[in-house]
Amino acid sequence: MPIMKWMLLLLLLPAGVHASDADAWQALREGHAMMLMRHANAPGIGDPPGFILERCDTQRNLDARGRAQAEAWGDRLREHGILKARVYSSQFCRTLETARLLNLGEVVPAPELNSFFSRRSRRSEQTRELRRFVAGLEPGLPVVLISHQVNITTLTSRFPASGEALILALPLEERVRVLASIRP
């Protein structure tokens, strides 16, 4: 569907109504949307005091359930016709592992997706950086971003479960339009 038809469709939807999941998946495949996913299941909240970003043994990590969720997400994306994607991930180990287990292509670490849970003062700045990052993405393969609950909630006003994904209309508007919310 050409971009103008998508824009018209999105403008015609009443405020509380979203495109169907099928339309959202189509928009993702065609580059009119992106997927923003919370990392898969990693028991706990935040990270231990003094964690080191480059050392997984100091962070909260995926458990067996989380690894299975991430692999299942890769299967789900392929079932919806997304065989390859541009995959960007926070630099935290649980997000990088989630992204790699999708098995959709190279995973590119992106600091704009890093959690600001332990540095809440970065909330506004980090969200602006994420918006700039998304705005700077060139057309091409579908985009999948793996991040954290605090980042996703600040951007979308949604509180995603572990492994939940949101398909967001592109370009991102001031009030982000969620086309679909998909549980693991």
Image (tube, helix red, strand yellow):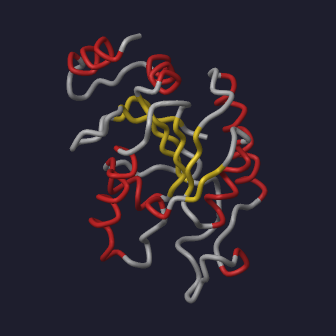
Q: Position of residue 123 (x, y in %)?
A: 32, 67
Tell me the residue at 45%/31% (across/down): 139
**Residue at image location 35% in from the left, 33% down from the top:** 170
Residue 43 is situated, as x and y percent measured from the top left of the image, at: 64, 66
Q: Quadrant of residue 119?
A: bottom left
Residue 144 falls left or right of residue 100: left
- Residue at the image position 65 percent from the left and 76 percent from the top: 54
Q: Is residue 41 left or right of residue 67?
A: left
Examine the rendered structure and indicate whether residue 136 appears above or below residue 8: below
Q: Quadrant of the N terminus?
A: top left
To which quarter of the image does residue 33 belong? Answer: top left
User: Above or below — where is 1 with respect to 149?
Assistant: above
Residue 174 appears at what percent x and percent y? 21, 44
Residue 169, position as x, y percentages in the image: 36, 31
Q: As rendered, which of 164 and 122 lies closer to the eye?
A: 122
Residue at x 37% of width, y 20% of height: 19
- Can you say whether 163 is above or below 179 in the image? below
Answer with the quarter of the image where residue 92 lies: bottom right
- Would residue 114 be found to the left or right of residue 69 on screen? left
In front of the other: 163 or 52 = 52
